[in-house]
Amino acid sequence: MSDTLPTTNGVSDRGIFSHFRTLSASSRRHQRRPTFPLANSTRRKPRRWPLALRFAKGSIHMQIVVPVVLHALFTLVVVFVDRRTNRSLGLPSSIIPSLSIVVGLMLVFRNGTSYERWWTGRSHVTTISTSIRNLTRSFLCCSYKTGSAPTPSDKADTESVVRILIAILYAVKNHLRAEWGVAIQPGTALGQHGVPTQQSEYSELLPVGLKSGETDGLGLPLELTFFVEKYVRKGIDKGWFHPPQASQMQMQLNAIVDAYGRMETIKLTPIPVAHLIHQKQVLALFGCVLPFALVNETGWWAVLIVCLVMFTLYGIEGIGSQLEDPFGYDKNDIKMDAIVQDTRQEIMVMLDEWKKGGEMFLHHDIAVQSP
């Protein structure tokens, strides 16, 4: 019996299967998947290079290259003078552990504080997004009287307030980035260097004829919450919401304002400048003392060793400086734009389903049972 596999048009089945496996792996690697929950916030492309080999995108190397090069040049001068003169410039290496403890403690404090600010900011973004989801669900399901379908006017008001809820996310994002230019025409996008444009970002979500109070000192996110509060008040007066339910809605709205205020605190309260000055000075001092402690034992190798040590220390410090303000456009900042887009997509799907009278909304049952 032959061991040769059957062939198809001169190609063995083994070759065909191998070919299809290759195509399948390639298609999985390059396939663009359709919309799904959190499509913008999740990573869709696999990493082609190990993180240890990345030196540009997402790293802080360009931010620290200047101080590292300066310390390398200083070490080069120290070693050159030490080798060309009869006088030794070396210092006892025992001074390094003492300085290392101080530098380590300061960097741990800086990075710990910065990451806490980053994580707290991300948690507050989730709080706002979750509260908006809860309010949207309640408004779409409960904005009518028991036994009667909502009127066209009531539906228009409900749709308007849901759109305002989405607009709050955009307004919070712009407010935290100090993009005050949108006050000229609320809901428009900003161009390069913060120049206002006529391009719509979320203007269709705002109330018609809204005049932003940002130029007078009133933040747009807070201003929009008044429209939501007014809608809740209207629902109470019309008998849509019973008191405990209305109280829960107001708690959700208060949670949005509270999270927004706490994110403002992160934005407006940087690390104290005294700490930043002393940290920079301690790092520079350590980098200047290190060559003298290494020159006798390592010679010209001291240049490379100092580069590696200062690359590590300045890198840790650079990461802390990036995480300090997590609401910007840096690669390591919170993905505010992606989160807002995902939440908008999610709520717009719910709104479209509600307008069609979808089965997941209570007024659908009323419409079906009505003669």
Image (cartoon, helix red, strand yellow):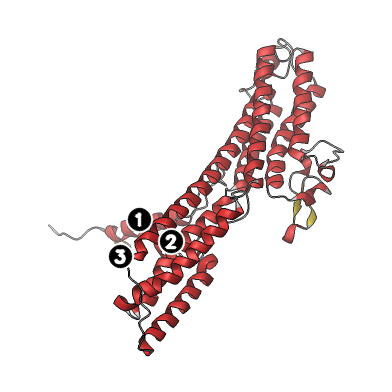
Q: Is residue 154 left or right of residue 5?
A: right
Q: Residues within 10 Å of mark 3 (few under 14, many from 20)?
A: few
Asked if residue 305 is positioned above or below residue 23 in the image, the reply reads: below
Which of 360 and 80 lies nearest the eye of the viewer? Answer: 80
The kind of residue on which mark 1 rests is Arg
Tell me how far mark 1 sits from mark 3, CA to CA. Answer: 19 Å
The kind of residue on which mark 3 rests is Gly
The kind of residue on which mark 2 rests is Arg
Tell me how far mark 2 sits from mark 3, CA to CA. Answer: 36 Å
Closer to the eye: label 2 or 3 = 2
Asked if residue 322 is positioned above or below residue 358 in the image, the reply reads: below
Which of 20 and 29 lies nearest the eye of the viewer? Answer: 29
Residue 349 can be seen in this image:
no
Instruction: Report helix, strand or loop for mark 2.
Output: loop
Query: Going from the N terminus, do you reach mark 2 or mark 3 first?
Result: 3
- Mark 2 — residue? 48
Q: Residue at x 66, y 30 (%)?
A: 353
Instruction: Report helix, strand or loop for mark 1.
Output: helix
Asked if residue 206 is positioned above or below residue 27 in the image, the reply reads: above
Asked if residue 124 is positioned above or below residue 254 in the image, the reply reads: below
- Mark 3 — residue? 10
- Mark 1 — residue? 21
Q: Quadrant of the C terminus?
A: top right
Residue 136 position, x and y percent, is: 66, 28
Q: Residue at x 43, y 77 (%)?
A: 75
